[in-house]
Amino acid sequence: LGLIPTLRKYVQDFEEKTKIRSLFETRGKEHRLSSAMEAAIYRLIQEALTNAAKHAYPTYVLVEITYQAQLVKIVVQDNGLGFKPELFQQKSKDHGHFGLIGMRERVELLEGRMEIESAENQGTKIVIHIPTNVE
Ligand code: ATP
Ligand code: MG
């Protein structure tokens, strides 16, 4: 199964399990990526959704994948509690939370970038860009 059907199923299961209304959308022309890249994207989304369910108490999450010519863009958004991302993104900080650090490392290995926008009571939006022309 390709990335998109796998993710669609994952988001459906997430909704059933958590009772959080969950939307999955794709934009652009789907194309297969390397299996390493697809696996990495799956794990990124898994951790972002797990965090939303565990920490944010949202009523709604959105996962959006956009295929562009040489880029895939991933958005994971929730409307929950929000947090201060700068507190949890430095490896040097020994705070015992590794999910976001692991996500950032995974994105960097793929030469992509990850931005986290979050504000108290306004939810969290994670935006990841991964270049797909580098193999
Ligand atoms: P784990 O190592 O199991 O992932 P964790 O989930 O606590 O533990 P991170 O995924 O790195 O660690 O997240 C760090 C912290 O950032 C969380 O403890 C939580 O306080 C906050 N956080 C992360 N994602 C969200 C979110 N979507 N909404 C609100 N807070 C979040
Ligand atoms: Mg986590």
Image (spheres, rainbow, N blue to C red):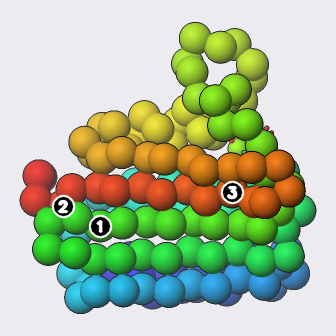
Q: Amino acid at mark 2?
A: Thr
The image quadrant of residue 78 is bottom right
Single out the mark in the foreground, 2 or 3: 3
Q: Amino acid at mark 1?
A: Val
**Does 53 sit above or below residue 120?**
below
Q: Nearer the viewer, residue 93 or 47?
A: 93
Q: Earlier in the sequence, mark 3 or mark 1?
A: 1
Q: Is residue 108 left or right of residue 86?
A: left
Q: Is residue 39 left or right of residue 82?
A: left
Considering the image in quadrants, where does the N terminus appear? bottom left
Q: Which residue is mark 1?
A: 72
- Residue 132 is tagged as 2
Dot 2, how many residues are within 10 Å of its Cα: few (below 14), some (14-19), or many (20+)? many
The image quadrant of residue 13 is bottom right
The residues bearing labels 2 and 1 have C-alpha atoms spaced at a distance of 7 Å
Dot 3, how many residues are within 10 Å of its Cα: few (below 14), some (14-19), or many (20+)? many
Q: Which residue is mark 3?
A: 124
**Residue 43: x %, y % from top left:** 51, 56
Q: Amino acid at mark 3?
A: Thr
**Residue 98: x %, y % from top left:** 64, 31
The number of callouts visible is: 3
Q: At x 58% / y 65%, what residue is drawn? A: 76
Quadrant field for ligand 2 = top right
Pointers 2 and 1 in contact (C-beta within 8 Å) = yes
Q: At x 33% / y 37%, what residue is drawn? A: 108
